[in-house]
Amino acid sequence: MSVPIPSLKGDCGDIGCWVGDLLPGCKLCMEGKKTVVFVTGVCPERCYYCPLSPWRKGRDVFFANNSEVESVEDVIAESVVSGSEGAGITGGDPIARLDRTLEVIRALKEFYGSKYHIHLYTTGILLNQRKLEDLISAGLDELRIHVTGLHSWRAIQEALKYPVTLGIENPSIPGQLRTLKDIVIKAWELGVRYINLNELEFSEGNYTSLYMRGFRPLPGSVAAEGSMDTAVEVMRWVVEEGIDVSIHFCPAVYKDRHQFRRRMELRAMRTRLPYEEVSGATVKWLRVRCPRSFEDMVVLADAGIRDGEYVITHPKVKLMEGCVGGLLEAYPTTPRRVLNETPYPHISGQP
């Protein structure tokens, strides 16, 4: 779908569209080079549209790229194998666990150096001058404020005093065109130059809440009807009024179809095991039982390894008659997340 807006970049499809420039964090995200650090599910806000899953919302859990971690060393390891050049710190509200957040920022900056880009999301409800100074001293490069009330604007005004890239990030809620325009005008008047509008997204955690308020998902999608149209209308208005702000619309499908896929592709190339074949964002391997003499030969030739009663080997290894098992396909996570298994000998390309 093309949207006739002057200076529009992108086509408002899977990657979204924008007027002006993108936040530095968004540019790295589009390349799949951002590690997502979920510091905690704890948050003092109660946004009805919060998409967090029930097993994260309100719980003090710690994740890096969807893998639960126990330490900052685990976060660094995940960033390394994912080929990341930056991190996005989110939650919950990362400020609710400020010590952990500061530890993550300092550790990543110490390991990678100053060029490693770190951005953070918060509503600003827990942010004050001291905490902001601590974040910037630790190495925070970019701050994104989700405007939920006067406390958000107070945080924005405070952040404008410091050398940190500042942006506003809010959902594009159908029926709230006037509210979004007011946010843009106030941001512009204060000197904020970046605004992200995220497509309103249905999830397990917010489905009932959204449905009860009259929102409906698009057929075959998690995106709410009218959310993209609302964001496009805001961008069209910004261009027509000559408002000097950059606005980026990020669609609900972007994370899975582009951000996640690109990150998995980079991770697959860095973590591929000798018996795995990289296939885009996934890895594949054979797990089979064969006549003992053949298994011994495969292992002796370093073409496979034993795994209990099975032999694990590369999909291109030509198997002898009598082998049975399957071709496994998985995301290159740690540990591997198996997606499906195709029975052998009914595998295309094998005898």
Image: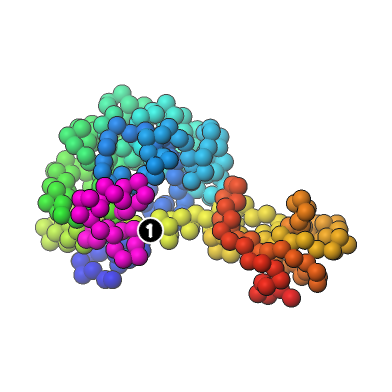
Q: Is residue 312 magenta?
A: no
Please state if 151 lies on the left or on the right of 13 as rendered: left
Instruction: Give the camera-side residue of 200 and 71.
Output: 200
- The residue under the point 44% across, 45% down is 36
Residue assigned mark 1: 254
- The magenta region covers 201-227
Q: Main secondary structure of the magenta part?
A: loop
- The residue under the point 28% across, 53% down is 200
Q: Residues within 10 Å of mark 1 (few under 14, many from 20)?
A: some
Question: Is residue 259 at least partly visible in the picture?
Answer: yes
Quadrant including the C terminus: bottom right
Instruction: Locate residue 281, reporting x and y percent.
Output: 54, 60
How many tags in the picture? 1
Vertical relation: 330 (above or below) 163: below
Please state if 127 lies on the left or on the right of 318 as rendered: left
The colouring scheme, among rainbow, by chain, secondary structure or one colour, is: rainbow
Instruction: Give the camera-side residue of 13 and 321.
Output: 321
Q: Is residue 214 magenta?
A: yes
- The residue under the point 59% across, 55% down is 338
Instruction: Locate residue 132, reporting x and y percent.
Output: 31, 29
- The residue under the point 56% across, 56% down is 331
